[in-house]
């Protein structure tokens, strides 16, 4: 709704109803899974049997809580470390790519930009399979030719990092590029006229302007890595990430521990969102 245009009372009422229903549709599953994480039941769904924290702290044979499940904790740390490395590499490469594509005299700019966007067009399943086949073929060739067994070229932790980095960098590039479009180039020119080098102008003028977008892109790349399953499932080795671990558990047996994990994820992301909201308000 455009506030500057006149609107009838019926239109405003329908608009508010639509907004309410829209956010209800988005938030109700998150609220339901958070509530059921404290349900005193051996099933992940209703009915409600009372309040309990067993699915977080219990360590009995009947109920094993989240914090006493060593395999689940290990998968969480695997996802956290994977997300950090993917976000760091994606932020570095994506930011450099955004700066490069803004150069006017960059040869093959259109072709390379199209190739950079390819991971967004290719389905994650196809991307995972292609990376697995490429890495396996390269690993077999190196082993047959030089007798070396390179871990990177077989399903492993670092192959997952490489696979997720392949699309994470594209998201970072787009987010930083959108911020870079608003940058006043005369600021760089002023720095260059004051005898600053090109690198110094970028470091002291351009990057501070891009800092909010870079931080936001890092968070987006981390979340994409943390939640990815369609590409990761083909590249994973002996250390499963949290989505892979949860998927394997829910296929055969499921307990409200899955709700407990989901509740912690929702709580953490909501906390970061609130902190980011107040930080942006304080910067205005």
Image (tube, grey):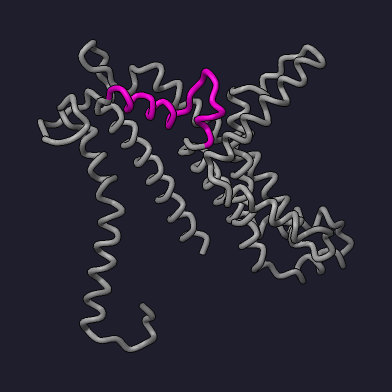
Residue at 28 percent of width and 33 percent of height:
259
Q: Quadrant of residue 108?
A: bottom right
* Residue 277 is one of the magenta-drawn residues: no
Q: Main secondary structure of the magenta part?
A: helix
Indicate the position of residue 185 as horizontal and vertical percent values. Answer: 75, 69
- Measuring 15% from the left and 27% from the top, which residue is drawn there? 40
Could you say which is closer to the camera, residue 36 or residue 283? Answer: 36
Residue 137, horizontal then vertical, whole percent: 70, 25
Q: In the image, what residue occupies the spot 42% across and 50% down?
A: 273
In this view, the residue farthest toward the bottom is 6
In the rendered image, which quarter contains the N terminus?
A: bottom left
- In screen coordinates, is 263 left or right of 35? right
Left or right: residue 31 versus residue 72 is left
- Looking at the rendered structure, the number of numbered marks drawn on it comes to 0
Relative to 232, 181 lies left or right? right
The answer to whether residue 245 is magenta is: yes
Image position of 191 (left or right of 151): right
Q: At which x and y percent is residue 216?
A: 55, 51
* 200 is higher (above) or lower (below) than 262: below
Quadrant for residue 22, please give it. bottom left
Where does the image place residue 112, in percent across and percent down from the top left? 74, 54
Q: Which residues are magenta?
A: 231-253
Q: Is residue 277 above or below residue 249?
A: below
Q: Please tell me which residue is depicted at 28% across the width and 26% down the height of the picture.
A: 257
81 is higher (above) or lower (below) than 211: above
């Amino acid at each position: 709704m455009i506030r500057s245009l006149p609107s009838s009372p019926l239109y405003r009422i329908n608009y508010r109803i639509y907004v309410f229903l829209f956010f209800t549709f988005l938030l109700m599953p998150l609220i339901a899974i958070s509530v059921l994480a404290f349900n005193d039941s051996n099933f992940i769904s209703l009915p409600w049997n009372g309040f309990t924290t067993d699915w977080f702290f219990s360590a009995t044979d009947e109920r094993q809580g989240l914090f006493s499940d060593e395999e689940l904790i290990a998968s969480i740390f695997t996802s956290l470390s994977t997300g950090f490395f993917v976000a760091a590499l994606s932020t570095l490469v994506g930011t450099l790519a955004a700066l490069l594509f803004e150069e006017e005299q960059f040869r093959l700019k259109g072709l390379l930009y199209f190739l950079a966007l390819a991971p967004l067009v290719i389905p994650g399943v196809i991307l995972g399979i292609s990376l697995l086949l490429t890495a396996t073929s390269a690993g077999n060739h190196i082993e047959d030719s030089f007798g070396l067994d390179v871990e990177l070229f077989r399903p492993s932790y670092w192959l997952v990092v490489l696979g997720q980095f392949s699309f994470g960098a594209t998201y970072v590039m787009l987010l930083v590029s959108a911020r870079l479009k608003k940058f006043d180039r005369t600021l760089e020119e002023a720095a260059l006229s004051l005898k600053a080098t090109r690198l110094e102008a970028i470091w002291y003028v351009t990057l501070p302007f891009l800092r909010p977008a870079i931080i936001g892109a890092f968070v987006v790349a981390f979340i994409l890595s943390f939640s990815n399953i369609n590409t990761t499932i083909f590249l994973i080795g002996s250390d499963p990430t949290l989505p892979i671990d949860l998927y394997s558990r829910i296929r055969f047996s499921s307990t409200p521990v899955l709700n407990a994990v989901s509740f912690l994820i929702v709580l953490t992301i909501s906390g970061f969102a609130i902190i980011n909201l107040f930080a942006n308000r304080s910067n205005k």
